[in-house]
Amino acid sequence: MKKRFFLSALLAACLLLPSQVRADEGMWLPIFIKRLNYVDMQKHGLQLTPEEIYSVNNSSLKDAVPIFGNGCSSEMVSANGLVLTNHHCGFSAIADLSTPEHDYLHDGFYAPSMKEELPAKGLTVTFFVRMEDVTNRIQEVITPNMTEDERYEAIEKIATEIEQQASEDGKYRAEVKSFYKGNEYYLFVYQVFRDIRLVCTPPYSIGKFGGDTDNWMWPRHTCDFSMFRIYADKDNNPADYSEDNVPYRPKEYFTINIGDKKEGDFCFIMGYPGTTQRYLTSWGIDFLVNTEYPAFVDARDAKLNIMREAMAANDTVRLNYASSFASTSNYWKNRIGMIDALTKNKTADKKRGIEAEVAAWIEADPVRKAVYGDIFQTMQHYYAATAASTAALQYLSQAGLSGSTVSSVGWQLGTIFSSPQYSDSLRGAFIERLPKYYERLDMNLEKRLSTELMKHIVKNVPDSLLPAVLSARIQEIGVDSLAAAMETSLLFRPEELQAALKDDPEAVLKDPAVEVFKSYYDQYLALNKKNREIVNSFNRADRLFHAALQKAFEGRRVFYPDANFTMRLTYGNILPYDPKDGVTYHYETTLDGVAQKYKKGDPEFDAPQKLLDLNAARDYGPYANSKGQLITCFLSNLDITGGNSGSPVINGRGELIGIAFDGNWEAMSGDIEFEPNLQRTISVDIRYVLFVIDKVMGAQNILDELTIVNVPQDAKLKNAKAEKPEKVKKAKNKRSKEV
């Protein structure tokens, strides 16, 4: 059974907005654009109709914005299934396809023909088909006298039934999502494509220029893009990889505009933001800043330090662990920025002001006091009572359960083979799957991660909250001896492990590393179970607080739903910002900035000589702006978060002008509180992307597939329109001869 409404529901909610919708803040459901946002969007520069943005019966922009992989957004850019996303979104697939002999991650890659495109095993691209309001069906099974557990089970049951009906026997993937703290429920239906092939990726030094140093920072000069192609069967339906598959024919794809951008220009983004906590209380913010995030950062910091050293010493290790390192470091730095921004921006104080108004509204009426009177006390009690266990859970999760690949294998193995609830067939499937887990692993690094992170857990988690098995072993032989025993584990000898699981699984369960890793999982479950009653009380108080908030501000505020990885639209303008006194950041950067930051041989700030030479010669082709500069990245005040990576940045005509890939350091608190004067979206300019494809990589065949407008009169690009069309219309391109 899926746990869609469990602990994540603790912090999920909605943010207040002024009754006049602002053209910056808000992650809006496209289905409601006509009712809530269209007039305002028109005033700012939108030239499309609501139906051209979102339509179920006709093709619309929603059909050109699929989910990429399991956590990114993307956009269709050709009639032949070309999909564009960020380099860091395609990073894992690119790393998996790379070898020391063919290092596509380092050197870059493009396929001169479709036959040379590289199948990315396990990668999916998912299209949003439709959504449906199922609130009434959900609420029919909920009664006021239900406990939180009963409520959860009832919702799970009916949601599963709705999803099964909507899937049409597996043709679609269906999900029921909760909005507004359980006040509304919507069904989302998707179509998942499984044959995805790498078409183009820039060299690492271009696609990851600036590395961890520039991550979340402005000014930025990263050409953060990669390009793949979706393949389908002859009927244009999803299919497993086959040489007989043909390029997918999308319902809609973007025209690309390479014209100038001006400060204040209207733009919008469509994509799949992951999670926001815009309704989080002041107590919740203090909890994150002082307890949860510091433990998260410390655990991941320990892991990154170990990985960084091993990767620097060995190129094969660097390649094989590049994706894991990148994903680990991304939110490590994010949480550091969150702590800093939440503190500097005094976000908790702003929330306390809202809470005071709600409290006054409650106190003004005896009936309200009877319904809502205990909610503040209950929430404060929850955070105080769970502080120590929450920090322990972060260490158990980040340094334990996901500390290494081997630790992940260990706790799963220990759980599956020790519990009678798991069938022999499931155990057999796990054994057969083992070699897959061990692909591309370095056992020396896995041993270091497993043992040193075990020591880190012991050092930072109070004895009373440590797993019982781990505590017992340490008392018996000491932490250093335990680490030495773990290094001898069968988990680091996969072939012997596989044979032993077939012959004598009971003996494997006594393996010292298996015992330790399983103890992480057991304690993780135990701490969550111990907190369950208080969590249920919190959930009730949180739901009532949300209801009270809406009523207290009725007529003065409008609510939009928190992000939950469903399609959203956010709109605003291209703008600079002032991060601190005396400092103003321009809204664009140029290729000159790459040359200025360049450090030969530096892992973060190296750059290909060809790129530097093109810049020195000012050889930008048709991609220069009217001043003769090549724009690399630009800023807007659009409201995005994780999951929006790879989202199309779209002008008022519905044309692609950039790809969103980051937020800015000064507004890292944005997931909790939108900071209008500081919060900015960082996007790679589409002209920089095309410049790299064209002038650096020489991939003319890719350019030939694209539809490009606002191209200088003297430029020679296939399928390009030198002059801006007078009317907005859906661009359709000729299919490649290779199809």
Image (tube, grey):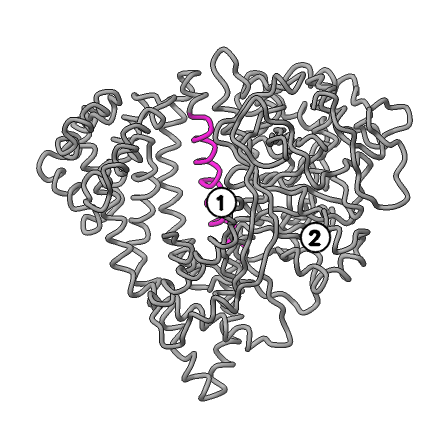
Name the one closer to the observer, 362 or 520: 520
The disc placed on residue 170 is 1
Q: Is residue 217 left or right of residue 450?
A: right
| Magenta: main secondary structure | helix
Residue 380 visible (yes or no): no
| Quadrant of res 142 | bottom left
Task: Give the mark nearer the N terminus: 1 vs 2.
Answer: 2
For the question of whether residue 457 can be seen, the reply is yes
77 is within the stretch colored magenta: no
Between the residue at mark 1 and the residue at mark 2, the CA separation in whole angstroms equals 21 Å
What percent of the width, then of the height, locates residue 484?
18, 26
Dot 2: within a 10 Å radius of its alpha carbon, few (fewer than 14), some, or many (20 or more) residues?
few
Residue 343 part of the magenta-drawn span: yes
Horizontally, residue 350 falls left or right of residue 18, namely left
Rendered position, 371 above or below 397: below
Residue occupied by mark 2: 57
* Residue 400: % across, % down: 29, 39
Q: Residue furthest top?
A: 101
Q: Quadrant of the C terminus?
A: top right
